[in-house]
Amino acid sequence: MENINYLDVLRQSFTLVILSFCSLLSFTVAFERWWFFRKARHKKVDEFLSHISGTLKEGKRDKAVEYTAKIDSPVARIFNYALLHGEMPKRDLEELLATKRQEEKLRLERFLGVLGTMGNIAPFIGLFGTVVGIIKAFRDLALSGTGGPTVVASGIAEALVATAGGLAVAIPAVIIFNYFTRRVKVIMSELEIYSARLIITMGNK
């Protein structure tokens, strides 16, 4: 059996073209989310909270608002939002911050559905390409009338490349999706913890 020319297979199989696009899309989303989460993780939050607490004790709420507005992170945005509505009763402020955390969660989960979808559908796209390829192989065998297993084996080997391609797209997409989902949970837990601490620090009743 001759060696498979994967470039020719790619040119001849629309399924592999689709999988190549899915792979590119998954990589693009993964890179964009990695860059976003890299900026979203606020280091030394305790020091950040202590600085705000000290500023509030000095009666300089405006400076605390200005300080938090300069930092681009979920924690800083939550703190800034809390400080802007700091005159509200404690219970109302807690409910308001809960809605703000949900807003941040939407920002964190943006495009993650793309990775989840690629992880789910890529194997089926590959399987579809394999089925179509096998059908084509047996049709070629029927039309040629000769060649026996050699003709079929070559066609099936090329068809199975689609299944391999589907798995190659799906496995990294699922791994990356689970990783970022875990990151979202960690950041959301941190937002709940630090927003509660900020409310206590602000002394709302």
Image (tube, rainbow, N blue to C red):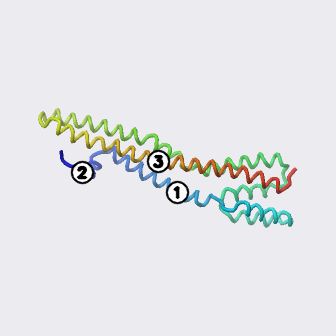
Residue reaching furthest to the left:
146
Going from N to C along the chain, the mark reached first, 2 or 1, is 2
Q: Name the residue under label 1.
A: 32
Q: Mark 3 points at which residue?
A: 173
Percent x, y of residue 188: 66, 49
Question: Looking at numbered disc 3 in the image, what kind of residue is underneath it?
Answer: Ala
Q: Is residue 178 left or right of residue 157?
A: right
Going from N to C along the chain, the mark reached first, 2 or 3, is 2
Give the distance between the C-alpha atoms of the residues marked 2 and 1, in whole angstroms. 33 Å
Looking at the rendered structure, the secondary structure element under dot 2 is loop
| Residue occupying image coordinates x 54% and y 49% | 179
Are the residues tagged 2 and 3 within 8 Å (C-beta)?
no
Percent x, y of residue 126: 36, 41
Q: In this view, does 173 lie to the left or right of 159?
A: right
Question: Looking at numbered disc 2 in the image, what kind of residue is underneath it?
Answer: Asn
Q: In this view, does 195 lie to the left or right of 27?
A: right
**Mark 3: few/some/many CA within 10 Å (<14, 14-19, 20+):** many
Q: Which of pointers 2 and 1 indicates the residue nearer the eye?
A: 2
The count of marks equals 3
Looking at the rendered structure, the secondary structure element under dot 3 is helix
* Res. 57 image quadrant: bottom right
Q: Which mark is residue 85?
A: none
Going from N to C along the chain, the mark reached first, 3 or 1, is 1
**Mark 1: few/some/many CA within 10 Å (<14, 14-19, 20+):** few
| Residue occupying image coordinates x 39% and y 47% | 168
